[in-house]
Image (tube, rainbow, N blue to C red):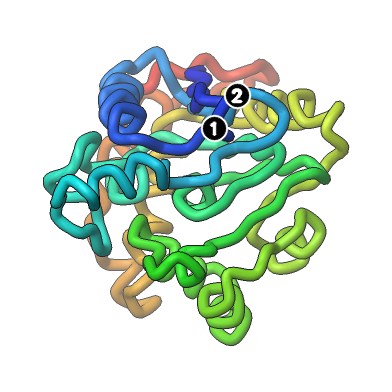
């Protein structure tokens, strides 16, 4: 398991260009390392997951005449960022305590599972700054909650507290801050007990089929499903069940 920490607590884990560059290498390493089956993304300290783009850096870049930004991060450090790694095959859990704002919320939305503390607060406040949620927030929020709810939060920048996020289906579970790590561990344990190729096959099939008709989803080709179908694990699972023992997953 990989534990990835946004480690700038003095600025509430704001994301500067260096952080994006380092994160890009981290995601490359996780995807390529067969020993890593699950990743947990969190922020250092107890005040924020991440408050998004480092606006002090952005203001300085604007003053220096840097190109304006828009949707996507192509050509910028860390590309493709997690928000644009549409083929990232391993499950990622967002462990959210405190603020997840702007790009921080967009990072969480790009994760597969979100576990939040009761202190968590989510928002996409870019509209209040003359910006847009360019790391996919405008697109993912409208796909993950009813459209009118998404538009309300996107056009006003209003915050979503943890209980509201749970009701909207944006997070999987909300727990007291002192139970956050225990809850995340329960989820990671469940993921690690599951067959790694089956997890990757299911994740790929779900995400790739979102815009397909149901009929086309059944007939589409999924790379990780082909690997799972012909794997040793596909034989090991039923065999272990019959033999009344825990399966030994080989991931191949």
Of badges 2 and 1, the one in the foreground is 1
The residue at the far bottom in this view is 148
Name which residue lies at 36% across and 49% down.
83
Q: Is residue 34 above or below residue 18?
A: above
Q: Visible in this render: residue 237? A: no
Q: Is residue 206 left or right of residue 43?
A: left
Labels 2 and 1: the sequence-earlier one: 1
Q: Visible in this render: residue 130? A: yes
Quadrant for the C terminus in the image: top left
Judging by the rendered image, the residue that carries numbered circle 1 is 11
Label 2 and label 1: CA atoms lie apart by 10 Å
Q: Is residue 84 above or below residue 219?
A: above
Name the spot of residue 171 as percent of width and height, x first. Answer: 67, 53
Q: Which mark is residue 70?
A: none
The residue at the far front in this view is 63
Q: Secondary structure at mark 1?
A: helix
Name which residue lies at 70% across and 24% down.
185
Q: Is residue 197 above or below residue 45?
A: below
Name the spot of residue 30 as percent of width and height, x first. Answer: 35, 22
Residue 218 quadrant = bottom left
> Pointer 2: residues within 10 angstroms few (<14), some, or many (20+)?
some
Name which residue lies at 45% across and 50% down.
103
Q: Is residue 131 left or right of residue 94?
A: left
Name the spot of residue 32 as percent of width and height, x first. Answer: 26, 21
Residue 71 quadrant = bottom left
Q: Is residue 15 left or right of residue 223?
A: right
Q: Is residue 221 above or below residue 152?
A: above
Q: Nearer the viewer, residue 31 or 166?
A: 166
Name which residue lies at 52% across and 32% down.
13
Q: Which mark is residue 44?
A: 2
């Amino acid at each position: 398991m990989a534990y990835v920490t946004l480690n700038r607590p003095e600025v509430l884990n704001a994301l500067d260009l260096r952080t994006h560059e380092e994160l890009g290498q981290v995601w490359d390493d996780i995807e390529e390392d067969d020993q890593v089956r699950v990743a947990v993304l969190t922020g250092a300290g107890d005040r924020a997951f991440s408050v998004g783009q480092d606006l002090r850096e952005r203001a300085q870049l604007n003053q220096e005449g840097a190109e304006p930004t828009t949707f996507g991060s192509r050509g910028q450090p860390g590309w493709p960022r997690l928000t644009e790694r549409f083929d990232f095959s391993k499950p990622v859990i967002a462990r959210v305590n405190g603020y997840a704002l702007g790009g921080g919320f967009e990072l969480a939305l790009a994760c597969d599972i979100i576990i939040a503390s009761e202190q968590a607060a989510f928002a996409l406040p870019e509209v209040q700054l003359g910006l847009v949620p360019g790391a996919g927030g405008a697109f993912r929020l409208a796909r993950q909650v009813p459209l009118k709810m998404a538009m309300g939060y996107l056009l006003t920048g209003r915050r979503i507290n943890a209980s509201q996020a749970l009701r909207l289906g944006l997070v999987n579970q909300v727990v007291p801050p002192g139970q956050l790590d225990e809850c995340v561990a329960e989820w990671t344990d469940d993921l690690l007990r599951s067959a790694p190729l089956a997890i990757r096959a299911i994740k790929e099939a779900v995400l790739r089929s979102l815009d397909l008709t149901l009929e086309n989803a059944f007939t589409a080709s999924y790379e990780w499903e082909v690997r799972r179908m012909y794997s040793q694990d596909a034989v090991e699972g039923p065999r272990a069940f019959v033999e009344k023992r825990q399966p030994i997953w080989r991931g191949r």
